[in-house]
Image (cartoon, rainbow, N blue to C red):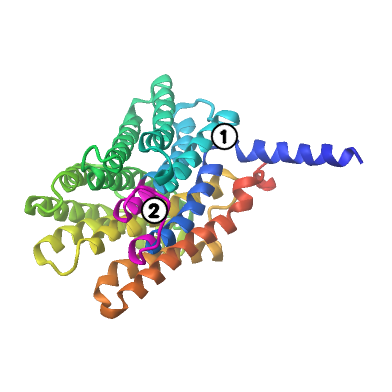
Amino acid sequence: MPAIPRYCAQESRTFLATFLSAGFRPFFLAAALWAAVALPLSIAYFEMAAELPTRFSPSIWHPHEMAFGFGGAVVAGFLLTAIPNWTGRMPLQGAPLAGLVALWLLGRVAIFFSASVPAPIAAALDLAFPAVFLLVVAREIVTGRNWRNLPMAAALALLFVGNMLTHLDAMNIAATGVFGARMGVATLAMLVALIGGRITPSFTRNWLAKTLPGAVEPAPFGGLDRFALAATLLALIAWVAFPDARATAILEIIAGAALFARLMRWRGANTGAEPLLFVLHLGYGWLALGLLFMGANEFLGVTDSTAPLHALTAGAIGTMTLAVMTRATRGHTGRALVADRGTAAIYVLVTLAAALRVSAPFTGEYYFASLAVAAGLWSLAYGLFALLYFKMLTGPRARSDA
């Protein structure tokens, strides 16, 4: 009989050792589960006047938890997995990784129940994760002398500041909640432009060389790419500071057009046979479309500002997030870089969710129904990821690659 508890204890230790062996494992799973839960809560809180035990207003809680909660976990999972490849240093794992995950979870609990605790305490508990994570990433980049990726530390600093600004609003110190939320969204969008712009043509080039020898390869990084990234950065800064200015709209249109031109040079039309790759192009396309729509809507006024904004968030950030999470999970657990039917279904669901959310203002009396269905599709996409990828995220690498 004593052998049974010892066996269970050994199994638990093996499970935890595997689960905490790389940052993408706990953080991708946590991000997917929170995305699946938080969005329906947001719809209920914002549209149905449901009560949540948070001191954040509905208009702030939703972007806060999407940008700094869900987005923070995705960024952590990606960077903690990518940085060891960039620096050649050992990844954060074991107890230190568990501590970082615990800080993220503590932040979610603190925000959700913030109406029941003093605002400064809720703020301190929530800001602990981005502060510690920033220090971890900065240490790895500096120690590894990986100066090329210092912008990643700058992005984390902006996420910390944006998060802090929302707390200043919640504490009635300054009316900076909306500004802070925009800063969070803009930072994530810029990361899509930078990281998506790095991996999409690279993976496409490798795939074309293997499956379609002789096909025209994606254009190398050049002047158009630099211009597109600079224009995107300038447009996002202008949007954060002056969201309704005509000059901002012009910058958004220029940036969106430049990103679209950049995307067209990556030969995405040749990748339709592999959804795991094509979805990267789709996510980047949402980024270009979102900026174009935001700028054009300022001049044409065809809808309220939430529709083009969600092309950027639900479309670009939501799609690129799932594209990276599925690909990184499969690659780092020894699975084939091929989308199975379940993975393809995830991409279809998140695309339908984004398209329906963007078009919701045009549905008239069916507006709320459109929002509800879009939220349901989004939750289903991320819930399906958590379900289908659970064994990959918590189990050992595939034996064929051992």
Q: Nearer the viewer, residue 374 or 329?
A: 374
> Is the residue marked by circle 2 packed among few (<14), some (14-19), or many (20+) residues within 10 Å?
many
Q: Position of residue 274 (x, y in %)?
A: 47, 61
- As measured in the structure, the alpha-carbon distance from the residue carrying label 2 to the one carrying label 1 is 26 Å
Residues in magenta, as a range: 45-67
Q: Nearer the viewer, residue 283 or 2?
A: 2
Name the residue type under label 2: Met
Name the residue type under label 1: Ala
Which image quadrant: the N terminus?
top right
Regarding residue 274, the answer to whether it shows in the image is no
Q: Earlier in the sequence, mark 2 or mark 1?
A: 1
Q: Secondary structure at mark 1?
A: helix
The residue at which mark 2 appears reads as 320
Vertical placement of 136 versus 179: above or below?
above
Residue 45 in the figure: left or right of residue 390:
left
Q: Quadrant of residue 176?
A: top left
The residue at which mark 1 appears reads as 98
Residue at 63% over, 46% down? 394
Q: Nearer the viewer, residue 224 or 149?
A: 149
Q: Position of residue 136 (x, y in %)?
A: 44, 27
Residue pushed farthest left?
Answer: 246
Which image quadrant: the C terminus?
top right
Is there CB contact under 8 Å for labels 2 and 1?
A: no
> Is the residue marked by circle 1 packed among few (<14), some (14-19), or many (20+) residues within 10 Å?
some
Regarding residue 27, the answer to whether it shows in the image is yes
Residue 299 in the figure: left or right of residue 319:
left
Q: Position of residue 345 (x, y in %)?
A: 50, 66
Vertical placement of 144 versus 359: above or below?
above
Q: Position of residue 342 (x, y in %)?
A: 55, 64
Residue 301 in the figure: left or right of residue 141:
left
